[in-house]
Amino acid sequence: MTAADPDLKNRPTLGSDARWTFLTNHGHVLVTIARDPQCRMREVASRVGVTERGAQKIVADLVADGYITRTRVGRRNSYQIATGRPFRHPVTDGHELDELLAVLVPIPPRTLDA
């Protein structure tokens, strides 16, 4: 934290008595996979703060409902986020998952051809 960035002092840190978050574990898993489509379940579980079995169950839910697809590549899985999928709660009716991911998942820089 620096004095030049006053917003940092107001940001809660992981483990600082965090009893709730704005996203569910399903949302956290989705964002994690969107950031790293080749990540392993052990990595997803660690980043989200759930067990590996919990991460597998959440991924199974997301696959079953068409929010992600899973493709086997050798001994690993690769995931792709489906576009145009709606949120699942009436409060967020009319919004798509793409809107959330556009805010939370950085867009990789494009390389310019010379």
Image: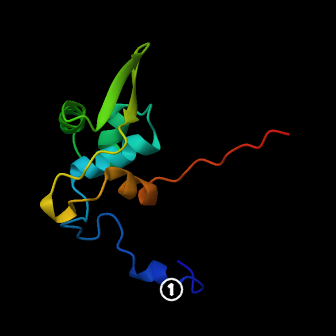
Please state the horizontal and vertical placement of residue 15, each as a whole percent of the image.
29, 64
Q: Answer left or right for 95 relative to 105.
A: left
Q: Quadrant of the C terminus?
A: top right
Q: Answer left or right for 70 relative to 1.
A: left
Look at 29% across and 58% down and name the residue there: 95
Look at 39% across and 76% down and name the residue there: 11
Q: Residue furthest front?
A: 94
Q: In the structure shown, which secondary structural element does the residue marked by tag 1 occupy?
A: helix
Q: 16 or 72: nearer the eye?
A: 72
Look at 65% across and 49% down and name the residue there: 109
Quarter occupied by residue 46: top left
Please state the horizontal and vertical placement of residue 69, each as a whole percent of the image.
33, 29
Q: Is residue 94 above or below residue 41?
A: below
Given the image, on which type of amino acid does mark 1 rest?
Pro
Look at 24% across and 31% down and name the residue there: 63
How is the structure coloured here? rainbow
How many dots with numbers? 1
Please state the horizontal and vertical placement of residue 25, each as a whole percent of the image.
23, 50
Residue tagged 1: 6
Q: 18 or 35: nearer the eye?
A: 35
